[in-house]
Image (cartoon, helix red, strand yellow):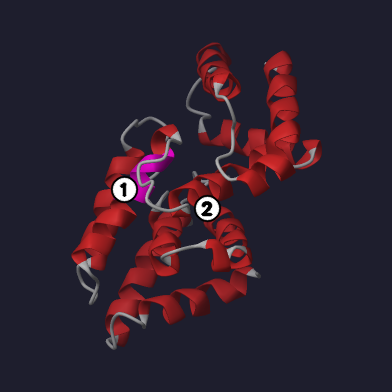
Amino acid sequence: MKRTELKPKWVDLVSNYTDKKAIVASLWKDIVDHYSNTNRYYHNLDHIQNMLSQAEDFKSHIEDYDVLVFAIWYHDIIYKSTKKDNEVKSALFAKKALKSLNFNEKRIENIENLIISTKKHQIILDENDDNAYLLDFDSSILGSDWKTYQNYTQQIRKEYKIYPEFMYKPGRKKVLQHFLERETLYFTEVYQDKFETQARENIIKELKLL
């Protein structure tokens, strides 16, 4: 999926829930404005694009595709490296935005929970595998080739540039160690098979370099 395809994807999705073009355009502007912030080096529209592409690949496995896709669009809309409530604020932002659409309350609540689940990368909604897929799409970068992974770590460091090394490194190590201590990094069998080994190798390698 090319960056130029993002807006049509958004319009197609939102147009299912409103016929008011002004609302579609306004919500799209919110998306672009937030994800295009100059302090975003990784958590930007490229990240959203990557996750949407994965969602399309696994569409037949997903129970409520639109809910999952809305969660992808909004899960990092609020992102400040100095804050610890980004996911909660992103969920509230999504709730407010989706109130302007003809959207079921229960489904909006599911979107909120999916977004909040990305904070600790733990499943909140377990009645189907949608939450598992969302988290695996979000973590897929960890299992990429080393060059891609290294570029990702550099982008994350730029997002935390406000912090000096003596503050950044211990925090980063704690996050990485937390991932390693999990029984599995990925929740779906297909992602475990594809990315688990490489992800652990990448994380161990990064830890040694910190």
- Expressed as whole percent of the image width and height from the top left, the position of residue 92 reads 24, 51
Q: Give the range drawn in magenta.
A: 113-118
The answer to whether residue 132 is visible is yes
The answer to whether residue 80 is visible is no
Determine the image quadrant of residue 2.
bottom right
Determine the image quadrant of residue 198.
top right
Which residue, given by chain and number where applicable, does mark 1 sit on? Answer: 113
* Camera-nearest residue between 28 and 102: 102
Residue 56 in the magenta stretch? The answer is no
Instruction: Give the residue at x 73% y 29%.
Output: 202
* Camera-nearest residue between 115 and 170: 115
At label 2, the amino acid type is: Asn
Instruction: Give the residue at x 56% y 45%.
Output: 136
Instruction: Give the residue at x 58% y 42%.
Output: 139
| 69 vs 22: above or below | above
- Determine whether the residue tagged by mark 1 lies in a helix, strand or loop: helix
